[in-house]
Amino acid sequence: MARWLPRSADLTRFCQKLNRVKTLEDDMMETSFNRCLSTIDLTLLGIGGMVGSGLYVLTGTVAKEIAGPAVIVSFIIAGFASLLAALCYAEFGARVPKTGSAYMFTYVSVGEIWAFLIGWNVLLEYMIGGAAVARAWSGYLDSIFNHKIKNFTETHVGTWQVPFLAHYPDFLAAAILLVATAFISFGAKVSSWLNHVFSAISMGVILFILIMGFVLAQPKNWSAQEGGFAPYGLSGIMAGTATCFYAFVGFDVIAASSEEARNPQRAVPRAIAFSLGLATGAYILVSVVLTLMVPWHTLDPDSALADAFYRRGYAWAGFLVAAGSICAMNTVLLSNLFSLPRIVYAMAEDGLFFQVFSRVHPRTQVPVVGIVVFGLLMALLALVFDLEALVQFLSIGTLLAYTFVAASIIVLRFQQQKVDAPAPAAGGRPSPQSHEVPSTGELKEYESFSDKLQLVDRDKSKEHREPGQLKAAFEPYLEFLSDFYPGEVVTVAVVTLMVSAICLCSILVFGNTHLHLPTWSYSLLLVLFSLGFLLSLLLIWAHEQQHGTQTFQIPLVPLSPALSIVLNIYLMLKLSYMTWLRFAVWLLLGLLVYFGYGIWHSKENLREPRPQRVSARYVVFPSGSLEERVQAVQPSSQPAAGLPDTDTDDCKR
């Protein structure tokens, strides 16, 4: 029975395979894509991804049903929360200018299986998101023509009464996706130009809404007679924040496009900052004019802006609002179709997904196979499926990606930069100038000289400390942590921080409702998990981090990413259990793909060194000399030539 159980060494190697990180090329600017996008192009892509139908629908819905005029405060808080996640993307996009967004960022810092699962969830997120926007686009256009398209389809094609399928096939939604797929396949420059056109029209309509809205504003609509500014109180504001947070989803298209940016080190952080700032300003100002034009409790949640102008006697303005809404939805469609194939390309290029999707068209320099295949799948989803039940799935995929990117920032910032081992001197011995010996009196034995050389150098110089090492000020109090590899304690602390955040948010969300905890235990658990979170944060902060890089760095690390992690986990736990159930099923499908294909075809798997017939052992003696012994690994019947049988014992002595 025992012989069928895996050995500990096999389990260790298997876990190492799952958590191996991506090896980046020396020249990260080299790419098969066309680096043609400027900062303005990336900014407009980000605006297009964020300022969609939510501006025309979400503002009215949250104002009437959740927060009242205090929806303005909800958007301010949601914008700040999104900024925390956006800054993490900005740092990664500048440091790793490769396509793949959250997938790539997780792969270079956390590990392979986590990166695959993030990419797998983002893949579904974009597919459902694009199909849902296409159906909303179709419904909005159909409403302008008094639902004639819907009536014609139901009369001549028929209706379905099947669970999970739409009431009728939406040919218009599928058609717009196929047209958008054709334009995206022409190249990044064509896609960017088309996005410029729709974004310009959308921003022009927003400017018109703001000017006319402030002209028609009536401050009495915020008075106590109409319910006041915050009729639902603080709870309504925070509930509105959770909903408004999803309005800012879309800036990751900028990070996904970093491999096509001319100067990603500067363009990506600037584009993320500009697009998020403009989108936040647009949402806040439109919320102001909307709630000042008409009383908030009389808003029509489905078409709040158009209805507000109609009730103030400007029915013609409704057509402009409709045009702006359609253009805004077009930019979101382009954003989804632009990002999705590039993330699939990154996964296929790394060997974790089917290789056919890594092909780049030699003329247009875009992953045309991925664009066509996933454009068709998106059109099929929009044609036949009822997406309302799946829209919440978008949230969990996005929040999970945000969480892992924030954790990856902490891990990467405290990682020791890789240093090549010095070349050995003549005669096979390491150069005496390449190392120093610790002055301690104990014997230290290392399996790999190049991996452990930094630990020897650390003891030589107390003044200069590498990232991941304990700060000098904390060494007298936390001396027992000095024996760990640089960055090892930080990695464990990040895991502890995330576990504490999950427990803390679980108590906040479920403690009084589902768990029915008494007050004393509720308070005690909150204090314990808060202490665990804060202690993990302090332990991370007690270590040195990377400084002086030439690219953008998020300020206040590890505090900023930690706050983003807590917020994302809290919002994930607020989602319904059906969303989590669908998420679990999708994860299981992803694991089947990974273990059936990805783990075997991964390029990192090909880079792993094969077992050698010679092993080297390095011993640091207290006397200050460094000696290498090489023992040939031979069968017992054939001893190594030129080496005595007592070589191993000699080395240990």
Image (tube, grey):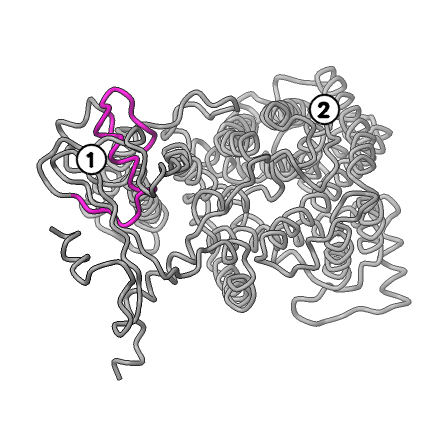
Mark 2 or 1: the one toward you? 1
Extreme-front residue of the structure: 642
Residue at 71% x, 63% y is: 385
Neighbour tally class for label 2: few under 14, some 14-19, many 20 plus, Cα within 10 Å: some
Q: Which residue is mark 2?
A: 40
Label 2: element kind: helix
Q: Position of residue 589 (x, y in %)?
A: 54, 66
The magenta segment: 444-471
| Front position in the image: 485 or 301 | 485
Label 1: element kind: helix
Instruction: Report if residue 459 lies within the magenta region.
Output: yes
| Front position in the image: 208 or 501 | 501
| Front position in the image: 218 or 629 | 629
- Please count the marks in the image: 2
Residue at 43% x, 46% y is: 110
Q: Position of residue 542 (x, y in %)?
A: 26, 29
611 with respect to 64 (left or right)? left
Q: Look at the image and tell me whether residue 392 can be seen.
A: no
The tag earlier along the polypeptide, 2 or 1, is 2
Instruction: Report if residue 594 lies within the magenta region.
Output: no
Question: Which quadrant of the figure has residue 215?
Answer: top right
The mark found on residue 456 in the picture is none
Say what amino acid the circle numbered 2 marks. Ile
Residue at 34% x, 58% y is: 614
The mark found on residue 482 in the picture is 1
